[in-house]
Amino acid sequence: MVIDPSTLSTTAVVDSGPRQPEWRRALQASLPVGIGLVPLGIALGVLVVQQGFNPWWAMVFTSLIYAGSLEFIAVGMVAAMTPLPYIALTALLVNFRHVFYALSFPLDRVKGRLARFYSMFALTDEAYAMTVTGDRKSMSGRVIVYSQLYLHAYWIGGAMLGATAAQWIPENIVGLDFALTALFVVLSIEAIRAQRGFAVPSMAVMCALIARLVDPGHMLPIAMGAFVSLLVIRYFLARRKVRTDA
């Protein structure tokens, strides 16, 4: 029997080999971010011990709070016996930006109540940035949750390492806290590359500079409020343009 090559379909699927397991893809995606979280966790662990807490409190803080900058504030507030209402109000003000994260975070891909609850709990700045700037097609629900689990593990591990080694780390050491700033610089660069444009980053920088001039003490809420307002205006203008062109 002779087969004419011209009759064969040109849309045949080419086998590209076995696909990587979701846990491994999540590990590869979270590793660069995790490298930045470990030294920051070490700094938190050192701070916990220097405030007079037992080293195992580092694991308690990082496991139950898991809010980055808020944890550094919470350690000092707990050490000073600050009333719970003040701690709750501080947590609301510091992490209010997470309300905006929920608008574009793909939580609908996460299946199961327990997985969704943990994904909401572990929605940190790093997890959000990694999810929205990465390849959305490969970000299944399991990859998202696995990535958040890995980031949480890096954070807890770094804090435990810092708490354990606090007796050998000098109190006046500087530079560890810059790990968070450096991490967000890298994430911002990746976000700009993914956007392929400078309109949104320019808007963010402009809002930050104006907020700095208006009220340096309340720069973050003013800048984020102005930035979200500009994004909403930009969305409606783009929507009107599409309707007009149609």
Image: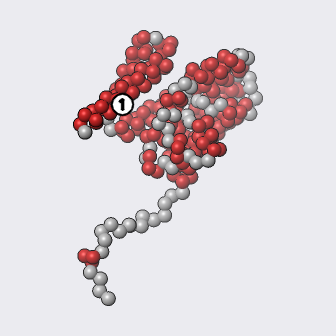
Q: How crowded is mark 1: few (under 14 residues within 10 Å), some or many (20 or more)?
A: few
Question: Measuring 43% from the left and 25% from the top, which residue is drawn there?
Answer: 228
Q: In this view, does 52 lie to the left or right of 234?
A: right
Residue 227 screen position, x and y as percent: 41, 24
**Towards the viewer: 31 or 170:** 31
Q: Is residue 171 left or right of residue 205?
A: right
Residue 215 vs 115, above or below: the answer is: above
Q: Is residue 7 left or right of residue 29?
A: left
Image quadrant where residue 213 sits: top left
Which residue type carries mark 1? Answer: Tyr
Q: Is residue 89 visible?
A: yes
Quadrant location of the N terminus in the rendered image: bottom left
Image quadrant where residue 7 sits: bottom left
Residue with the mark numbered 1: 235
**Towards the viewer: 165 or 212:** 212
Residue 130 vs 184, above or below: the answer is: below
Question: Measuring 33% from the left and 38% from the top, which residue is drawn there?
Answer: 196
Residue 26 screen position, x and y as percent: 53, 49
Secondary structure of residue under mark 1: helix
